[in-house]
Image: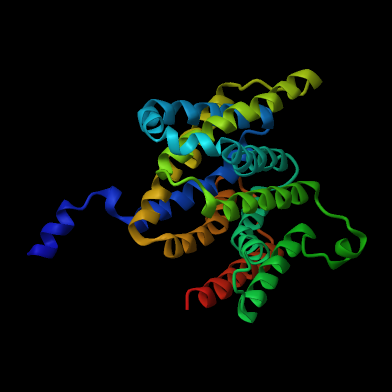
Amino acid sequence: MLARAKAIRQGPFDRPYLLLILTMLFWGGNAVAGQMVVGEVSPLTLTFLRWLLVSVFLGVLYGRRVAAEWPGLRPRLLWIAAVAMCGFTGFNSLFYVASHDTTAVNIGIIQGSIPVIVLLGAFFIYRTHVGWLQIFGAATTILGVIVVATAGDPERLTSLAFNPGDVIMILACLLYAVYTVALPNRPKVSGIAFFTVMSMVAAVTTLPLMLYEVYVGSVIWPSFKGWTITLYIALFPSFIAQIFFMRGVELIGPGRAGIFVNLVPVFASALAVVILSEAFHLYHGVALALVLGGIWIAERHKLR
């Protein structure tokens, strides 16, 4: 009876697996949204509008929280700005630029390499112990990314004939990995106050990028469809997903929650095929298996 009563009292915000699965679904959907918005709003303008909207949402809801924790944030503002420019400004800008030259399936699979890049970054920066199984897992994941970037054709590797969008997405993943590796050194404040300030930094630092599009004449102001997708990106992958992820980490810990990130390339690939009717080739399947398999090997060894 007590267990039943506890289950009845448990709300959706107390179910970590539901929250984390929805988070990965929203993040996977971001790859599809990036494709759907091509031609409806230019990529750097989209990035600015995304973080402008998110910073407004967070400022309204958590502005007082930020003010209360400002003494812990103010001394680290330069550090916060640098990290936000890598993980929010740089990653998202390159993400949407890449969407113009590659598919959502490719973006999703390449994005799946981030955990392994973070593992390698932690080794080089913090000298975190990395075993042979983790090295093997990392190499397997990187091989999967190479399979995507070469479309399964080894001759492209020897001739360095890569899809520009895939290369841009790899650079985006490197920036997000830098952001992730830096997070353990973040200010000792609440996650939501930290996220709110970083979103505001992202809004400010993406404004010059949008103005650059205006200057060179490549800006595309949002159409009605563009605004609809921009609102989706701001509300779901950016705002709700981050809140859900922080709550999931709070409930089950970062180690267990981090494993759910492996679902992002799965959801991105499935949504791209269903919504965009993108082709899913054999090399995509091989690459997805290599990326997920490599992450599984690395994470399984790490959690022992």
- Vertical position of residue 56 compared to residue 92: above or below: above
Toward the right, the furthest residue is: 159
Q: Quadrant of residue 177?
A: bottom right
Q: Please state which of residues 145 and 119 is positioned toward the viewer in this rendering.
A: 119
Q: Nearer the viewer, residue 32 or 48?
A: 48
Q: Position of residue 173 (x, y in %)?
A: 66, 52
> Residue 284: image x %, image y %?
67, 62
The residue that appears at 56% across and 22% down in the rendered structure is 224
- Tell me if residue 36 comes above or below residue 210 in the rendering: below
Where residue 113 sits in the image (x, y, percent)?
64, 60
Quadrant of residue 285 in the image? bottom right
Residue under the image location 72 percent in, 43 percent down = 98
**Between 131 and 91, which is closer to the camera in this rendering?**
131
Is residue 258 visible in this depiction of the protein? Answer: yes
Q: Position of residue 148 (x, y in %)?
A: 73, 60
Q: How is the image coloured?
A: rainbow
Q: Is residue 40 visible?
A: no
179 left or right of 151 in image: left
Task: Please tell me whether residue 29 is drawn above or below residue 151 in the rendered image.
Answer: above
Quarter of the rendering occupied by the N terminus: bottom left
Tell me which residue sits at (36%, 32%) in the image. Answer: 68
Residue lying furthest left in this view?
Answer: 1
Residue 180 is left or right of residue 120, and the answer is left
Q: Residue furthest bottom?
A: 132
Count of numbered circles on the image: 0
The residue lying at 73 percent from left, 49 percent from top is: 171
Q: Quadrant of residue 112?
A: bottom right
Left or right: 26 as drawn, with respect to 278:
left
